[in-house]
Amino acid sequence: MKRRLLVKTRNVKNFVDLMNNLIDKSSEVPKMGLVYGDPGLGKTKTAIWWAGINDAVYVRAQNKMTSHGILEKVVEELGEAPSKKSTDLMKQCIAHLRLNPQIIIIDEVDYLIGQSKTIETLRDLHDLTGAPVVLIGMQEAKTKLGKFRHLYDRISEIVEFKPFSKEDMETIVDELSEIKITDEAKDIFFERTNRFRQTIKGISTLENLAKTNGLNKIDVKQVKGLKIEQ
């Protein structure tokens, strides 16, 4: 499989637009964003890619993570040694981000939704530092976060990651596959995959099949026999 940093699907382009819109907003406008959608559509991969090339802070939330824990991770990603007290951790964030503005990306926010104190900490992180804060979650994240009105009212940009269009699938296969896949075979392949991880595994399996059997292209026969993990 060809090594590429990221395939720029419609979802990726919408993610980039969200980030640019947040950056361009005036200081009077809330700068929180929400990215949500079903698993396997590339939300995390896109966030890590964007954070890496734009010097953003990326933190992956964990199950039952407290407000102290999330602040500690942010401070670590800012390159500082975390304080022991939560109040001091917030002060570290404020001092650092006011001097060196960066976007904060919190992935897997679903883990935090059951803890109102942690959610309010994310709001404080945005309000007290002036830094844009982007939350990434599953399909239900938008509805669940809507219950936290003080936080949700600050979300000024929202993007839903959706299943790939045929154009997206064409781009993914053409850019990542090292073996030619006929148009007829692509049509069948597209009918059976609509998640990024599914697609990547499918391409890898087809490439191995072609290598093992000395094939210079993949046709309908190979794709029909392909087992796709759901």
Image (cartoon, helix red, strand yellow):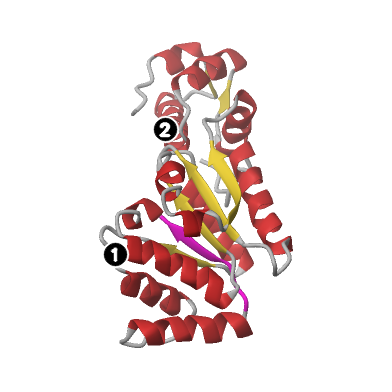
User: From this viewpoint, is residue 79 visible?
Assistant: no
In the image, residue 22 sits, relative to residue 69, either above or below, namely: above
Where in the figure is residue 194, as x and y percent of width and height? Answer: 48, 28
Task: Please determine whether, in this image, residue 3 is positioned above or below residue 207.
Answer: below
Proximity of marks 1 and 2: CB atoms separated by less than 8 Å: no
- Label drawn at residue 24: none
Q: Residue furthest left?
A: 64
Q: Quadrant of the C terminus?
A: top left
- Identify the residue under disc 2: 198
Who's the residue at 70% across and 57% down the image? 20
Taking the spot 57% from the left edge, 31% from the top edge, the residue there is 173
Q: Which residue is mark 1?
A: 65
Per the image, is 105 magenta?
yes
Q: Amino acid at mark 2?
A: Gln
Residue situated in front as seen by the camera: 74 or 22: 22
Left or right of 179 on screen, residue 82: left
Reply above or below: 67 against 176: below
Mark 1 falls on what kind of element?
Answer: loop
Give the extent of the magenta segment.
101-107
Q: On screen, 197 above or below 119? A: above
Task: List x then y, in percent, for residue 120.
Answer: 41, 65
Q: Is residue 207 left or right of residue 169?
A: left
Looking at the rendered image, the disc whose residue lies closer to the viewer, 1 or 2, is 1
Does the magenta portion include 171?
no
Callout 1, which amino acid? Answer: Met
Please name the residue shown 30% across and 54% down the image.
Answer: 114
